[in-house]
Structures are given as C-alpha cells and as structure tokens.
Image: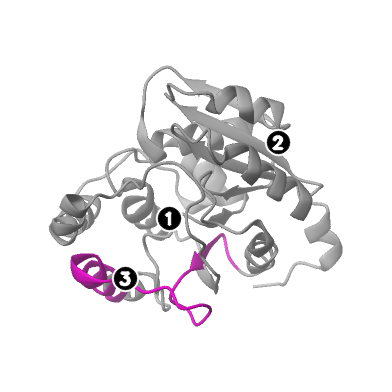
Amino acid sequence: MTAVSETSVSTRRVLIVMPALNEQASVASVIGQVKAALPETDVLVVDDGSVDETARLARAAGAQVARLAVNLGVGGAMRTGFRYAVAHGYDVVVQVDSDGQHDPEEVASLLRGLDQADIVIGSRFAGKGSYKASGPRKYAMVALSLVFSRLAGRKITDVTSGFKAMGPKAIRLFAAYYPAEYLGDTVESLVMAIRAKLVIAEVPVLMRERTGGIPSHSPVKSAVYLSRAGLALLLALVRRRPSVDSSDAA
C-alpha cells in the first residue's frame, strides 16, 4: 500500500467523537486536553441520554454536541458520530472516551497508522505501559486476540479497545451500520471491517485512570465477561448485517 505523505496527513479533516453518559465530572477537562493536543481537529460529544450536565459543560468547553433522547450505548453513540462525519465531509474519525482514560497526546500515533491502514486500534497490550487485565476479562481478551489475529491476517492484541482512528472507508462502512449491542462496537464492528476487506492495524498506547464517572463494568459483569465476549463473537460470525463492501466504501 502506498504511504500517505506528511502533507496529505496534515490536510485530513479529523473529527474526535466522544460518547458520553453522565460524564459531567470529566468531559470539559478531556475536551480541553483534546484541543490543546490537536488544535486543528473538531470535537463532537455524543450525549448518550445523560441526566446530568454533560451536554451543557461540553458545549461550554467548545465541542459540538449531539444529544440522544435515550441511552443507546457506545455503539449507538458512535453510529451517530459516523453519520455526522459523513454529512460534514470528515476524512478521519477518532473515538476518544470522555472519562479521561484515553490520552489525546496518543492520537497523533493513531493518525500516522492510517497511512497504512483503514482502522488503527490503540492497544494497551502492544508494549507500551503496564496495563494488565485479570480474571475472566484477561482470558476473554487472549481468546479474542487469537481469533481476530487469524481472521485479520495480522496480530491484534486489543480487540476491545475503544481508542481507535478510522479512515474514509471505515467511516462509510460504519455510518451505514454500526452495531449497538454489548461488545458490538468492538467485536462485531471488527468482524464487519474484516469482511469488507479493510486493513486493521494497532499502535501501542498508554491508558490512564478514569478522571470521573462510573466504570461501565462492575465486578458482576467482569465475572460473566468471558461468556458474553464469546457469544458476541459467535453472533458476529454467524449473522449477516447490512453492510458496505470494500468497493462501495472506497
């Protein structure tokens, strides 16, 4: 694949999409960090049915805000972001969590990865930092890594990472349909991308502790994570979703 020049990279229109559910404690700070690290990019906060001040604080911090009437989950919020990107002519969408775990300083390495790929995953397990999973979550991640590495034809260590950059083909694919079920935004979306013959790559990133909000996975959820991850993968492999193939997405 021909590498994209640095000049071309600098002219890409990049949209940071931040799904947010009741993140009033952190959303303004994260937007400020994004704007400081990436002053040429635009930020869209998708307020996923929050009942706090998330939307107001996001607007005050300088972001565009799309408010969903009900909570659709990360997948539903990101689908809104992809459709916004298509409607407004963006070349790249970068998913950044609004809870502060994703360091905006790492986005530049994700964007460089798009020189050779359609989707670049920020991996917690690719050699940078000391992030470690434990218990059922660890076993699920190892199993998913083995399966997806085989499906994609290259090593993928962090299937469930929500820190990703996506180029034009992926944006069009995911704007047409993006899974909203539990783990669909990670597991099933990657199956869709592989079926559409999109190139998936990883870059190592550091993950930070949450600066606010409530963790989405409780100890009870962690206990059943392995079985649910396996079920999500099985459903993704056996069912056919409305999709866009690689020629349509080009």
Q: Name which residue lies at 47% across and 23% down.
A: 52
Identify the mark at residue 89; answer none if there is no mark. Answer: 2
Residue that badge 1 annotates: 193
Q: Position of residue 163 (x, y in %)?
A: 51, 57
Can you say which quadrant of the picture contains the N terminus? bottom right
Q: Is residue 151 above or below residue 214?
A: below
Q: Position of residue 135 (x, y in %)?
A: 20, 70
Which of disc 2 and disc 1 is earlier in sequence? 2
Q: Amino acid at mark 3?
A: Ala
Mark 1 falls on what kind of element? Answer: helix
Highlighted range, magenta: 117-146
Which of disc 3 and disc 2 is earlier in sequence? 2
Mark 2, Cα crowd under 10 Å, few <14 / some 14-19 / many 20+, is: few
Q: Is residue 222 highlighted in magenta?
A: no
Q: Position of residue 174 (x, y in %)?
A: 47, 42
**Residue sitting at the far bottom:** 127
Horizontal relation, residue 216 to residue 111: left or right: left
> In terms of depth relative to the viewer, which is nearer, 86 or 208?
208
**Residue sitting at the far right:** 7
Q: Amino acid at mark 1?
A: Ala
Please name which of the two marks, 2 or 3, marks the residue nearer to the observer.
3
Mark 3 falls on what kind of element? Answer: loop
Residue that badge 3 annotates: 133
Measure the C-alpha gap from mark 3 to mark 1. Answer: 25 Å
